[in-house]
Image: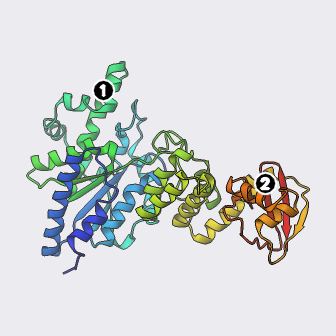
Amino acid sequence: MPEFPPVEEQLAILMRGVDFGDAQTYKNMEAELRQRLEESRKSGRPLRVYCGYDPTSPDLHLGHTVTMRKLRQFQDLGHLAIFLIGTFTGIVGDPSDKDSARPQQTLEEAMEKAQTYIQQAFKVLDEEKTEVRYNHEWLSKLTFQDVIGLASNFTVQQFLARDNFSKRYASGAPIWLHEFFYALMQGYDAVALKTDVQLGGTDQLFNLMAGRKLMESFGLRPQIALTMPILVGTDGVERMSKSTGNTIGITEPPEQMYGKVMSIPDSAMRNYAELVTRWHPEEIDRLFAELEAGKLHPRDLKMMLAREIVSIFHSPADAQRAEAYFIRTIQKKELPEDMPELMVGPDDTVADLLVRAGFAKSKGEAKRDIKGRGVRLNGEVVNDFSLHPQPGPEGMVLQKGKRRFVRLIP
């Protein structure tokens, strides 16, 4: 019989980051999860936890990994993760976040994309503790009478109350009948899998609750629904989506991934820090407090984000190379080809070098420039005027403002 960690310890990990936009729903789902975890400890039966991913494109992106990381947390605590590929729901397309119907695809097209999903999923999930399923296995076998039975559990008003449908209805934009079927199909997934917990984005709450409703109608204990915040795309506004073209793929080359993270607006950095990094919430709070206080430059924090994300999906060494590539090709492209050189002694501080380079009339002025965040070393803002630069064979670039540069050499 497997041994699970104490319930409160599991609960603290599993509810972290969960968001329903409603305090009462959070309280209800937390209470249900606590009870299910207590039963799991007593019986030794792992919880069956799943999340579905429609293969609308061949590649998984960072947005997918938000729920995948929560799946991994369940795995690490001893529970069973089901990686469900929506080979049938993907034919219809999820209308949850859309102001128009998705283009439909064939089952063959969905299955082809599903193969790459499996390969990529194990960048996050533990392969040995993952069950991969395809929902065409059961959805394609439903009869028309079965579908009518599923539909009888819901009213048209319930669907029209959904934000995306209500907006389209009010504006006169088309709402296709087959889009209503999506929630029925996703809800039936829970029935077919007999799951304890389903994960999804906050925009998926209606579909997850539909699963609870259908499980009850089939005489099953309703699953617990846990929803996670939405990761915005590289535009910093819309949710990350292949159809919007604002994605960062988890198999993209390190240099490309690093560069895309650096391209996100400053306003999106906290969203990425909370949903994609391995940073502890207290560390995130500290970093953004320093950012707000002016102790940390937005670009420096963004570079930390880029290093972390590349390290997760590639390696720390890849992240270092990607950063060096970014500095060389993006930041340093603005540097003048001919730059004066300044030899650095073992006791020289940045303030000393600014004076010797003629960038400041005195060390006092140099310190004020540094305090005002106007000095950079290899593109990084200098915060410590007593820093002793240690240039390597290629030297280092000391910059004041936008137009004054000197190459430091050993």
Please give the name of the residue rendered at 28% of the width and 29% of the height, measured from the top-left corner.
177
Give the position of the C terminus as an image quadrant: bottom right
Q: Secondary structure at mark 2?
A: strand
Q: Nearer the viewer, residue 139 or 164?
A: 164
- 28 sits to left or right of 391: left
Label 1: which residue? 166
Label 2: which residue? 400
Q: Give neighbour class at mark 1: few <14, some 14-19, many 20+ (Cα, 10 Å).
A: some
Q: From what the image shows, is residue 97 above or below residue 61?
A: above
Please give the name of the residue rendered at 55% of the width and 66% of the height, measured from the top-left corner.
311
* Closer mark to the observer between disc 2 and disc 1: 2
Quarter-wise, where is residue 11 in the image? bottom left
How many badges with numbers are in the image? Answer: 2
- 28 sits to left or right of 61: left
Q: Nearer the viewer, residue 377 or 140?
A: 377
Per the rendering, the mark at residue 232 is: none
Tell me if residue 334 can be seen: yes
